[in-house]
Amino acid sequence: MRAVTIKEAKAKLNELVDRAVAGEQVVLMRGAKHVAAIVPVSAEELELPPRLTDDQAARFWRLIAEEERKKGTVTLPSAAEAVAHVTRGPRSGRRRRG
């Protein structure tokens, strides 16, 4: 692990990013306190998860309760599909009886 001050990091940012990409931990310090880190990220990690509106979240929990009452579940392959399911209603997904 390499720890550097923010001032040093400003002067050597490209080098520090290269070190992080190579697998070295680079920690930024403000005074004697560790405050941040430079780490590599992949394209998958940059994908932001979809967010539900309050109405969509309420509908989501209603659908969960309804499925529990029916003793069935809907299997969706991704969070985006789940948001779409909640937005448009229970027309997609594979229903499993359990």
Image (cartoon, rainbow, N blue to C red):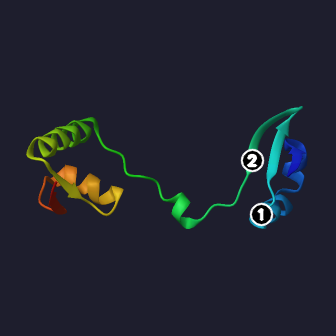
Determine the secondary structure under disc 2: strand
**Residue 94 picture quarter:** bottom left
Badge 2 or badge 1: first in the primary sequence? 1
Q: Residues within 10 Å of mark 1 (few under 14, many from 20)?
A: few
Callout 2 amino acid: Ala
The location of residue 21, given as percent across then percent down, is 75, 65
Residue at which label 2 appears = 37
Q: How crowded is mark 2: few (under 14 residues within 10 Å), some or many (20 or more)?
A: some
Determine the secondary structure under disc 1: loop
Q: Which residue is drawn at 87% across and 46% down?
A: 3
Q: Is 11 situated left or right of 48 in this image? A: right
Callout 1 amino acid: Gly
The location of residue 18, given as percent across then percent down, is 80, 65
Residue at which label 1 appears = 23
The location of residue 45, given as percent across then percent down, is 55, 59
Marker disc for residue 31: none
**Residue 91 picture quarter:** bottom left
Residue farthest left in this picture: 70
Q: Which residue is drawn at 21% across and 49% down?
A: 86
Q: Which residue is drawn at 71% across and 55% down?
A: 39
Taking depth in this image into account, of 95 and 55 the one nearest to the observer is 95
Q: Separation of disc 2 and disc 1 at Cα?
A: 12 Å
Determine whether 17 is above or below 31 in the image.
Answer: below
State if disc 1 and disc 2 touch (CB < 8 Å): no
**Residue 31 picture quarter:** top right
Taking depth in this image into account, of 16 and 95 the one nearest to the observer is 95
Q: Is 32 situated left or right of 17 in this image? A: right
